[in-house]
Image (spheres, rainbow, N blue to C red):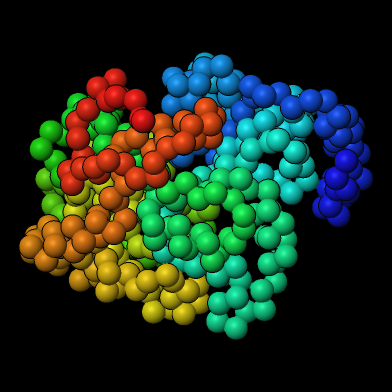
Amino acid sequence: MRSISAKARRVTRQPSRALKYALYRAQLRLPLDEQLAVYSAYWNAAYSCNPAAIYEKARELAPHIRGVWVVKADRVRNIPAGVDYVVEESPAYFRAMARAKYFISNANFPEYVVKRPGSVVVLTHHGTPLKLMGLDGLTFAGRDGTGSAELRKVVAKWDYSIAANPFSTQAWNTAFPGRYESLEYGYPRNDILVNAKPEHGERVRAELGIAPGQRAVLYAPTHRGGNAGKASVYLDVAALAESLGPDAVVLTRSHYFYEDRPSAAAGAARVIDVTSHPRVEDLYLAADVLITDYSSTMFDFAVLDRPIAVYASDWSYYKRSRGAYFDIAEEHPGVFATTQEQLFDLFASDAVDGEDARRRRAAFRERFCALEDGRAAERVVRRVLLGEQVDHRPAAAPRVPRQTTPADQPALS
């Protein structure tokens, strides 16, 4: 039996958890359940992202493998009806974590979780990286690498790492060096952006109250580290909505680290707060334009080949303090602004979807979206859960997303 870490030992010293952890240790002596897969997203806070897409495809292609989601007690409401789940740190949770063969998450599982021989850990990640990640970030700008040893131990548990594109594969290799197999398949969460029919987006628009003919502009910023909790300091969304006029509506989606909502400004007309919407992919399909900063939303939204505006008022500071894999000011997917006035002017002049913006968007899509053919989740399920050898590249990724359903597509060879 592998020894447990100092952090795990601290867990056992907490009276309310010691008994449950003893149960976990006892369950580790039992055989792996070869037909049990544990799923998690965003540290057990949601049913979403790549793990959700993989789970749904596994129910179709590998129904003999039971999928169970881990969820925090106060987030059970996020689990759809019909989806099995265990509450974080409940007895059922510790039993599942001890016995499962497969672990699939877009973030790492707790350090105390033992990587048993024969178990399979899949790290799906939750975005194409712009800012430096992992060891790259820990050693950036003279940092001493504090935390590197702990990170290497966590990465050593991975069997597979999913990459949306060759760029991500390279970034993960330096950010998270390890012996895992890189699955350069595209992102499962983006399959719906390719496969959804037009009525999908129309339905979401109607549910959000967007009038027919209105231009829907989605504003989805990332967090800023030291400024987490202060989303509204970056863009005045009420002013944006006013500048766009009555034929437009602004959808605002705060990062989950934020405490405030940018739409909270008094008198914010034609602004809809969609932070609590369960599936960001639905919002992409409903939106006509995306405004973001350094968020991975730009890489996903680009699959749809719709206009993207990067509003990065603090780019100079951000790249010095956080580091980046490339210069978004030079290699953006449409238009780039550092002030609100510039941003509003780009919309007023229609430059947001002008010739230069389209050229840049095409180059961006070629670099980051070439694998997105709507079958990434299928590739993951076949490789990981069914043990099949799968070509890492689709036969032909579409330049414009196809309007097909999975039933229209033949099985992968």
On the image, the x and y values in percent for residue 256 come to: 50, 49
Furthest-bottom residue in view?
142
Residue 235, image quadrant: bottom left
On the image, the x and y values in percent for residue 282 come to: 32, 35
Tell me: residue 137, above or below residue 211: below
For the N terminus, the quadrant is top right
For the C terminus, the quadrant is top left
Q: Residue at x 68, y 67 (%)?
A: 148
Number of numbered discs: 0
Confirm whether residue 156 shows in the render.
Answer: yes
On the image, the x and y values in percent for residue 69 come to: 60, 29
Q: Residue at x 35, y 62 (%)?
A: 293
Tell me: residue 57, above or below residue 225: above
Q: Nearer the viewer, residue 22 or 286?
A: 22
Confirm whether residue 20 shows in the render.
Answer: no
On the image, the x and y values in percent for residue 285 come to: 26, 38
Left or right: residue 75 compared with residue 346: right
